[in-house]
């Protein structure tokens, strides 16, 4: 994620188009305010570039034009996803299967994932996208923290997750493993853009 100056589309956009836009924005502000107040005198081309990049990073990266030109080359998976997680961990001789929710926050330069369960929650420490054989994957490592009532039976642990994004079905499917030696499968269906911050 973020700027990749090995990509031609990124060189053209971030090193040519965006600087030109920042000069035009700076010039336009001075045309509108020929005698600007003291706080506007700092709107130089550099600050204009920072403003434009910030707007792109936060909002505009997901617009179709940036997808079509290859500037935003990773999928937009922002939102709340609801599904199921299975595990090799067993209780009473049966493999554990639990309901789960993941919520994804995403900008052009960063993605973070929070997972919510009935008895615990986890948060990504590192997250990124990768493309293999035409398929998009979301990879992340996480720290899991059981609720205070469950700490006698559950342990704080770390793990890693790999989820394939299926755009037509609006699904995230994949697998995980954790530092406790358990692994399993995950299957999530997109629910909504709004994040709730809980199970």
Image (cartoon, rainbow, N blue to C red):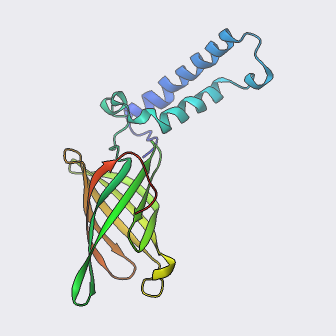
Instruction: Please state which of residues 42 and 120 is positioned toward the viewer in this rendering.
Output: 120
x and y percentages locating residue 60 in the rendered image:
44, 32
Q: Nearer the viewer, residue 49 or 159?
A: 159
Could you tell me residue 57's position as x and y percent?
A: 49, 38
Q: Residue at x 44, y 67 (%)?
A: 122
The C terminus, quarter of image: bottom left
Judge from the rendering whether residue 22 lies leftward or rightward of residue 128; answer left or right.
right
Q: Is residue 58 left or right of residue 77?
A: right
State the image coordinates of residue 4 (x, y, percent, origin top left).
43, 41
Question: Which residue is the extreme one toward the bottom?
Answer: 92
110 relative to 132 in the view: left or right: right
Note whether 4 is above or below 83 in the view shown.
Answer: above
Tell me the residue at 29%/76% (across/down).
183
Q: Position of residue 61 (x, y in %)?
A: 42, 35
Residue at 24% across / 59% down in the picture? 173
Q: Residue furthest right?
A: 38
> How many numbered markers are drawn?
0
Please name whichever residue, 7 or 62, is drawn nearer the observer in this view of the structure.
Answer: 62
The residue under the point 57% across, 16% down is 24
């Amino acid at each position: 994620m973020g700027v990749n100056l090995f990509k031609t589309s990124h060189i053209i956009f971030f090193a040519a188009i965006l600087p030109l836009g920042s000069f035009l924005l700076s010039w336009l502000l001075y045309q509108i305010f020929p005698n600007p107040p003291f706080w506007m005198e700092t709107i130089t081309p550099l600050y204009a570039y920072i403003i434009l990049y910030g707007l792109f990073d936060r909002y505009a990266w997901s617009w179709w034009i940036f997808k079509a030109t290859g500037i935003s080359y990773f999928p937009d998976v922002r939102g709340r996803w609801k599904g199921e997680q299975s595990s090799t961990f067993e209780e009473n001789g049966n493999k554990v299967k639990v309901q789960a929710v993941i919520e994804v926050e995403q900008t052009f330069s960063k993605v973070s994932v929070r997972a919510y369960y009935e008895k615990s929650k986890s948060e990504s420490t590192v997250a990124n996208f990768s493309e293999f054989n035409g398929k998009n994957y979301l990879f992340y490592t996480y720290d899991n923290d059981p609720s205070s009532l469950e700490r006698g039976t559950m342990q704080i642990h770390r793990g890693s997750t790999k989820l394939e994004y299926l755009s037509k079905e609006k699904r995230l499917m994949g697998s995980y493993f954790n530092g406790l030696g358990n692994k399993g499968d995950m299957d999530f269906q997109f629910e909504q853009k709004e994040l709730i911050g809980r199970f």
